[in-house]
Amino acid sequence: MKVLFAGTAFERLKGRGVLAAFTDHEVRITGEDGLREALPWAEVLVTGPREIGSGLLAEAKSLQLVQQWGTGVEGIDLDACRRYGIRVCNVPSRGTGNAESVAEMALLLMLLLARRYGRAQENLFIHRRVHAPQGVSLWKKAVCLVGLGNLGRCIAERLACLGMEVRGVNRTRRPEFASWGVNAFYPLEDLEKAVEGSRFLVLALPLNDRTRGIVSRPTLKALGPAGFLVNVARAGLVCRRDLEEALETGEIAGAGLDVFWEEPPDPRDPLLERPNVVAMPHVGGVTDAGLEGITRFIRDNLDRYARGEPLYSEVNARTGDIE
């Protein structure tokens, strides 16, 4: 099969031998500038997050399958793909190293905020006294975890191991939530109620029309001046202006971000300069385990497609749900 890997990141992966896993197929790599020119050749498009709409698909004369390198398909016009007869698959996050790695990132951001890492580093390098600053232990603290899909499950299991009280928020309720370590369940419309009294608000849900901007000023006020927001999902879940005002006025204690409204973020972004914000450049799933697991999954899926077998993780074109 003719497989086109679209994005400059795949050039770096080529140097690591990742694309050697696809030697049974005819493979090309293109950057952003060469995508439209190369697309008519491709039968399969393997892509990271990007906008794929009718205009681009109209030029894809031979395209049969779009395989997302990761979970998020919010940039893909699923209805247009259906009209053109193009199938769409993503990579399930749990079991491929992706959700497991992102869950670890959520814990890292929580710990950096709770233990006041920035201030601790200041004390270390200016020879200030030891035993300061005082941090916040995660043990026995309440955390409001929004989104109980594959990623949410991985986070909940790890939070439970730390002895935290996990309040799960999700669109639907499933009986297995309790076995993941979720102590209490709230429907999505009761988010503010779930947040009250929580020390942490952790976002792990997909971005869609229902969830865009779900965290706004009322939710942040409910979190309170001792609370921390941690977002390892999608930046669009949070109203940026409301977050900036909450941080500025002390309505919340701080925020940990691995996702931004524009990526890569501007190095001069004022959020990056705030002492009560810790940030990472969207690397939650960028680990050895994630790379190996995603590569293996996509290779197996393309092999199945070439043999005419049912595909793994074919996206529901009605919802685009990545839970």
Image: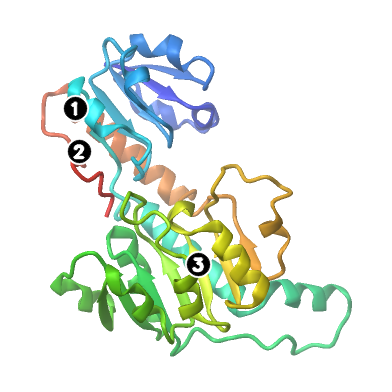
Q: Quadrant of the N terminus?
A: top left
Q: Earlier in the sequence, mark 2 or mark 1?
A: 1
Q: Is residue 159 visible?
A: no
Residue at point 19% right, 27% down? 82
- 30 to 299, vertically: above or below: above
Q: Is residue 208 left or right of residue 304?
A: right
Residue 29 screen position, x and y as percent: 46, 19
Residue at point 21% right, 77% down? 179
Q: Tag on residue 317?
A: 2
Residue 262 appears in which quarter of the rendering? top right
Residue at point 63% right, 64% down? 278
Q: Amino acid at mark 1?
A: Arg
Q: CA distance from mark 2 to mark 3?
A: 29 Å
Residue 4 screen position, x and y as percent: 38, 20
State the residue position of label 1: 82
What SS does tag 3 mark? strand
